[in-house]
Amino acid sequence: MKRFPKKATLALSLLCSALTLALPAEAGEKQAIKAGTIITMDGDPIVDGVILMDSGRIVAVGASADVEIPWDAEVTEAPDMVAVPGFVEAHSNNGMDRTNETIDMGAFFDVQDSVNPVAFYFEDSLRYGITTINIQQGNQCVVAAQGAIVKPFGATVAQQLVRPHAGLKMSVTAKRGKSRATQAAALRKAFGDLRSHLEKLVDEHKKGDDRARREALAQGRDYDGEDGKGRAMTGKGWTLEGMENIPRVEIDEKLAPLLKVVEGRMAVYMYCGSPAEVHTALNIARENGFLHRMIFVLGSGCFKAADEIAAAKVPVILSRTLVHTERDPITSEETLTFEAKVFQDKGVAFALTSNNSGLESLWYQAALCVGQGMARKDALASITTSPAKILGLENRVGVLKPGADANVVLYTGDPLSVTSHVNLVFIDGQPVYDRSKDVRLQHLMDGEQPKGTAPSDEEEGEMHAGEGPSDDDKKGEGSDSKGDK
């Protein structure tokens, strides 16, 4: 029988370990957590508190004396730990097999088709307390794919999903091969193409031409659902009379997501890499009526446009670089600007993003904000309640209160301290991460070999066979060739 190379066997064993880490432990539907401190983000911290969960939702949060634990609930005792809401990553392009698409108009793509449920990124997210992630394509786009909000747990994308079709990513920053002017023109052209397409459908209907219907039927589209009917077009930018006669299933699927944007039924995550691009983005949003559904994804330095952003009342997702550095070209004097404080002072809602998927995750970014003088409650809000509100999930995630999703993280101490770490993570009321069972972390921190991954003596020899220097190499040792100098 053919044997797999040992390296492949080792990789397969580690992958199986990752899958084991991602699967929930067996537990009843009712769960209770007794924690030394509970930071609810919905009021004052609770000392010696209880979080009661049932069927994936929180049903009660309060002091131990005030919350009765049902007899059939599985109880997690954590008297020395701090319970916090699972952190919310407001924008990420990790966890996919491809970050960007090269075409200008990619609204018909869906990131669900690219998400890899066993990506190490999701495992790292659990290690650092992130339980909700808004996955969007990267910034090298004009109009990118439809995003998805997921939880970093599940064997399939369907199990991970929190909200599908969660907004469209757009960019006014020039992608490779474009200037700023051609980028803006391409973005406007996308909406112009939508309008031309809709006008053609209305005109064909008036003439009795059923081309669009025949194409829709040939493609197997469903006329029985709500989209099988026509309805008047709504929107705060432009509208088109006659759309009440056009079944929505007859609209080109490549352009249909843009119609949702124009009608205010889909959010837009608009990337601006510099403050000069903010004005263009706001104009395009106003022209097409989606300003109230737009969220800025900003590059470093965009705080210079904070006044215009504040006047437009658009929330922002900040870059990973929290402190912007500028050097005076004459004096070489450096000016440092803490960007989050600028937006906070202007009254702009903002969320942080991780610097990387490792130690510099959301907790680290929030801790940096505290180090820059931001109030602790505001720093915590920027990775919990604020991103939850930006994503339209303020009643579900980023908070511990009755009715919210039961996403709870147990820290060994202060969640913003470098000496603390995540010990347990619950998603939808079920334990999905236990640090004591994290074999990859144990291997890294303690040098403990994960079970089933150590090579046998015979395979060890096979792995290293041919890796040493050849006889010719040995003969050449000590020679002083010109190429080595």
Image (tube, rainbow, N blue to C red):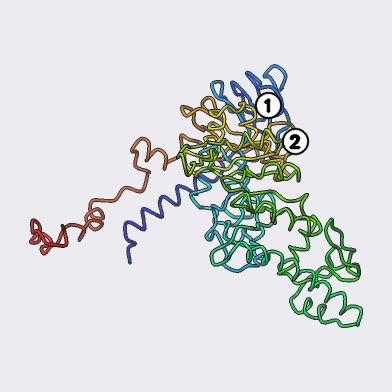
Q: Position of residue 188 (x, y in %)?
A: 71, 65
Report crowding for label 1: few under 14, some 14 to 19, many 20 or more residues within 10 A (C-alpha).
Answer: few
- Most extreme residue toward the front is 330
Asked if residue 475 is positioned above or below residue 393 in the image, the reply reads: below
Asked if residue 467 is positioned above or below residue 81 in the image, the reply reads: below
Q: Quadrant of the N terminus?
A: bottom left
209 on left or right of 59? right
Question: In percent of the image, x 49 and y 31: which residue is there?
Answer: 421
Question: In percent of the image, x 51 and y 48: which residue is there?
Answer: 121
Badge 2 is on which residue?
403
Q: Nearer the viewer, residue 110 or 287?
A: 287
Badge 1 is on which residue?
71
- N-terminal-most mark, 2 or 1: 1
Label 2 or label 1, whichever lies nearer to me, is 2
Kind of residue indicated by mark 2? Gly
Q: Position of residue 81 (x, y in %)?
A: 55, 24
Question: In percent of the image, x 84 and y 73: which residue is there?
Answer: 199
Local SS, label 1: loop
Q: Nearer the viewer, residue 177 or 70?
A: 177
Q: How many marks?
A: 2
